[in-house]
Image: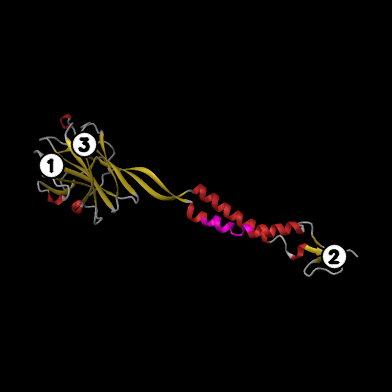
Amino acid sequence: MNPPRLESDGRFPLRTRKTAQFLAKCVRPLPIIVFVRYLFCSLADRTHAFIYSLDDGTAEVSVGLSLDNDLIALNSFPTISGTTIDTISIAFGFGAALNGTPFQAVLWNDPNGDGNPSDAMVLATANGFISGAGTDTFVSLSISPTVVTTSNFFVGFILTQPSGAFPATLDQTPPTFLNRSFVTANAAGEGNIFDLTANSFVPLTTIEGAGIPGNWLIRAGADVTQRVGDSGQSAFLLGLAILSVTFVRRLFHVTPADHLCSNSDRPVAGAKSC
C-alpha cells in the first residue's frame, strides 16, 4: 500500500497553502498601515492668496477735512484662521493735487475681538506716496509678513492732507457693510495711530456715525494657510485599505479543513475522504 499523503481538492495545493500562510503573516499589518496613512496623511497644508475687501473697486465719494489735519481711515475685517498679512492697498480720492502726498499704511490687531478699533494695537506699518489719485487705482505697499492671531484686524492709513483735498474714497454701492469703516483725525503732525481714541479733531467713529455711509477702498493682501483634505488621495488610500483587508482575509482562509482529503485508509483528522 502506498504511504498516505495529503492532497488538496484541486484548488490550493499544499505548497501553495504554506506560501499563502507565510505571506499572510508578512502582510497582516498592511491594512492598519494604509488606514493610518489615510487618516493622518491625506490632509495637507494649502496656502492661497486672499484679498480682504469691502469695496467693489469703484469709489462714489471722496472724503477729506477742511483744514490741514492728520486724517486716519481704516477698515475692520474678521480674520480667517491662518492669515498672514503682507500688503495693504488703498485707492485715493479725486484730484491730481494729491499725487505725491506721503502717507503711512497701518495694520492693527483687535485685542478684545469686538471689531471696534478703540483698543487697536499697531502690528506693522509701511510708508508710501499717493499716485493715481481719483482713478480708483490702488497703491499697494508691502509690509513685513504678519500673522494675525486676533479674531478681527484693521488696515488703514494716516496722512497729513493738503487743505481742501479729499484723500479717502468710499464705495457707496450696495451692499455696504455697517460698522466696518472708521475715521478719526487730529491736528497736523499729531495724528496718533497707537491710540486711536486720543485723536480729538474728529473723535474715532464709524463712517456712518460721521454721516457719510459706505466703505473705504482699503484692502489687505494675505496668504491664508489652511489644513485641507486631498480628496483624490483620500479616495485612493481608502480604496487601498479596503483591498488590503480583503487580500489579507483571503490569505487567512485558503486552507479550511474541508479543502483537504486523504486517499489513505487512515484519513487525516479533519480531512474529507477523496
| Residue, disc 1 | 70
Identified at 55% across, 53% down, the residue is: 238
Please name the amino acid that badge 3 sits on: Gly
Q: Are marks 3 and 1 in contact (CB under 8 Å)?
A: no
Q: What residue span does the magenta drawing correspond to? A: 26-36
Name the front one of labels 3 and 1.
3
Which residue sits at x=61%, y=55%? 244
Give the image location of residue 236, x and y in percent: 55, 49
Name the quadrant containing residue 163: top left
User: Identity of the amino acid at label 1?
Assistant: Asp
Residue 28 lies in magenta, yes or no? yes
Q: Please give the name of the residue rendered at 58% of the width and 52% of the height, measured from the top-left corner.
A: 240
> Which is in the foreground here, disc 1 or disc 2?
2
Q: CA distance from mark 2 to mark 3?
A: 98 Å
Crowding at mark 3 (Cα within 10 Å: few <14, some 14-19, many 20+): some
Q: Residue furthest right?
A: 1
Against 106, residue 37 (above or below) is below
Tell me the chief SS of the magenta region: helix
> Residue tagged by mark 3?
128
Q: In front here: 128 or 196?
A: 128
* Disc 1 element: strand
